[in-house]
Image (cartoon, rainbow, N blue to C red):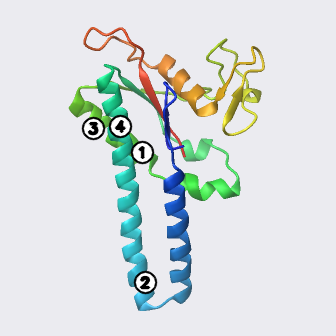
Amino acid sequence: NLAVDSQGEIYSGKEVDKKRVKFDKLKSALQKKDSKSAKRHLKKLSGKEARFRKDVNHCISKKIVAKAQRHSLGVALEKLTGIRERTRLRKAQRRQHYSWAFNQLQQFIVYKAKLAGVIVSFVNPKNTSRTCPNCGFVSKHNRKTQSSFVCKSCNFAELADKVGAINISRLATVNLPIVGSSRDLQTTRSLA
């Protein structure tokens, strides 16, 4: 998942992964050839891949901001400083994780939110994936797998990404009413 909001809407990365695998195979084949033509094609391909990432980030950010504006909500995002260093990944996940432009997605959300008059807040993500939104119990054992969350204290179960988004929502400083609304804050958790 590239992003998940606190209402549980998932902005999936399945199409992105398919496209990334296709780009990787093509790049690998071209790099083996080592000709001028192959190098030219590689350069073109690099630009195409960057434009694809940018387009996907624009589409996701547009949906997130439109949803927040439609429901008179703010948007809370996790601070991404050091995300690559603080996450531990299996070898198979590294390429996928390191190649996505998390910061670009956040920048697009911020500038579109500003244009739409939607408040944006940044939250320290520490323990947001380990804290139970139901009882508040914090443990690394609450997350047995990358995608599932089961609280060891109260047995609350949910998708791990949604739990993170809910906790980020609660930590946000923008839980203030927007235009007289007393609704909760929509949060978006940027993911690999």
The residue at which mark 4 appears reads as 63
Give the image location of residue 21, x and y in percent: 55, 65
- Specify few, some or many for label 4: CA neighbours under 10 Å numbering under 14, 14-19, or 20 or more: few
* N-term-proximal mark, 1 vs 2: 2
| Quarter of the view holding residue 67 | top left
Q: Nearer the viewer, residue 107 or 59?
A: 59
| Quarter of the view holding residue 45 | bottom left
Q: Are marks 4 and 1 in contact (CB under 8 Å)?
A: no
Q: Of helix, strand and loop, which one carries label 2?
A: helix
Rounded to the nearest whole Å, what is the CA distance between mark 4 and mark 3? 13 Å
Q: Of helix, strand and loop, which one carries label 1?
A: helix
Rounded to the nearest whole Å, what is the CA distance between mark 2 and mark 3? 35 Å
Give the image location of residue 133, x and y in percent: 61, 17
The residue at which mark 3 appears reads as 111
Residue 62 in the figure: left or right of residue 191 = left
Rounded to the nearest whole Å, what is the CA distance between mark 4 and mark 1? 17 Å
Q: Nearer the viewer, mark 4 or mark 2?
A: 4
The residue at which mark 2 appears reads as 39
| Residue 179 seen in this snapshot | yes
